[in-house]
Amino acid sequence: MQVFDTGDVRLHYRVDGPNDGAPVVFVNSLGTDMRLWDPILPLLPKGLRVIRFDKRGHGLSTCPSGPYSMGSLITDTEKLLDFLGVQACVFVGLSIGGMIAQGLAVKRLDLIRAVVLSNTAAKIGNPSMWDERIAQVKEGGIESLADAVMERWFSPAFRNSPEIEIWRNMLVRQPDDGYAGCSAAISGTDFYTPTSGLRLPCLGIAGSEDGSTPPDLVRETTDLIPGSKFHLIRKAGHLPCVEQPQEFAQVLNDFLKGVGHV
C-alpha cells in the first residue's frame, strides 16, 4: 500500500505484478474501495501490472471537502498514472469508474489503449435524483440509504447470503463527505457527445439485475464507440465482479487477449 500526493488530495494506491508488465488499471464504484476487485485478481493472467487506487473521499485516500467535479476525479487519475509512468493501459472502470474511464480517454488517449466500461453510462440518473441522495447522506449518513443501495447493487439471491454484510459494511464505512462529493460529480456529468468521438477498443459489461445502470443503459453507452463489444452477465447486479467473478474475469481475459495485451 502506497500514497501519492496529487497536490490537493493524497491517493492510496497499490501496484501488483512486475513493473514491466502490461498495465491494467482498475477504478471502482461509488461507495466502494479498491478491494472491490479482490475476487477477480487471482483469475487474471500472470505477468500483468495491476494498478488500483481509492478515489478521493473513499477508502484510505484523503477526503477533501466537496462537492467534487468529474474533472477533478479524472485529473487525480491522470496525475497518478503519469507518476507511475503508465502508457497504453487497459482501463477497467465500474460505475463512476467507467465515467472516469470515458473522460480520461477523451483527455489523454496516450494513457489508454482500450477501455472496459462495466455497469456504467455516459450519463447516470439526473440532478434531482442525486440532489435527493446527497441531502439524505448529509442528514442521516450513508447508513440511511445503505439498504436501498444493496437492492440496486445485488441480485436477490446474493442479498440473502452472508456475504452481503461485507459489502454493506464497506459502503457505510466510506466517508459521508466523500460519497456526497462523488455523487455531485456523477450528477454533473454527461459524456454522450465526447464518448461518441472515441475510437479505441471497448468492452461493455452489464449485470442482468443491475438496479443502478440497467443493461440497456450500458449497451447504449458502449454503442457510442464504433466496434465496441458488449457482454451481459446474468444473475448479477451492479457489481458483477463480486457476484460472478469467474465469468467477469473470463470475459475480461478474452478482451485482454483480443487487444494483444497478454
Image (cartoon, rainbow, N blue to C red):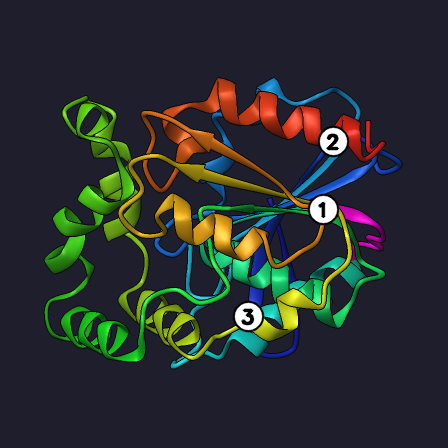
Q: Quadrant of residue 73?
A: bottom right
Residue receiving disc 2:
256
Amino acid type for the residue under numbered disc 1: Gly
- Residue at the image point whose x is 40% and y is 44% from the top: 215
Residue 103 % position (x, y): 63, 68
Residue receiving disc 1:
227
Q: Quadrant of the C terminus?
A: top right
Amino acid type for the residue under numbered disc 2: Leu
Q: CA distance from mark 2 to mark 1?
A: 15 Å
The residue carrying pointer 2 sits among few (fewer than 14), some (14 to 19) or many (20 or more) residues within 10 Å by Cα, namely many
Using residue 198 as the reference point, say whether residue 22 is left or right of it: right
Q: Secondary structure at mark 1?
A: loop
Q: Which mark is residue 192?
A: 3
Q: Nearer the viewer, residue 262 or 138?
A: 262
The residue carrying pointer 3 sits among few (fewer than 14), some (14 to 19) or many (20 or more) residues within 10 Å by Cα, namely some
Of the image marks 3 and 1, the number of the one nearer the N terminus: 3
- Labels 2 & 1 near each other (Cβ < 8 A): no
Q: Secondary structure at mark 2?
A: helix
Residue 116 % position (x, y): 62, 44
- Residue at the image point whose x is 78% and y is 47% from the top: 89
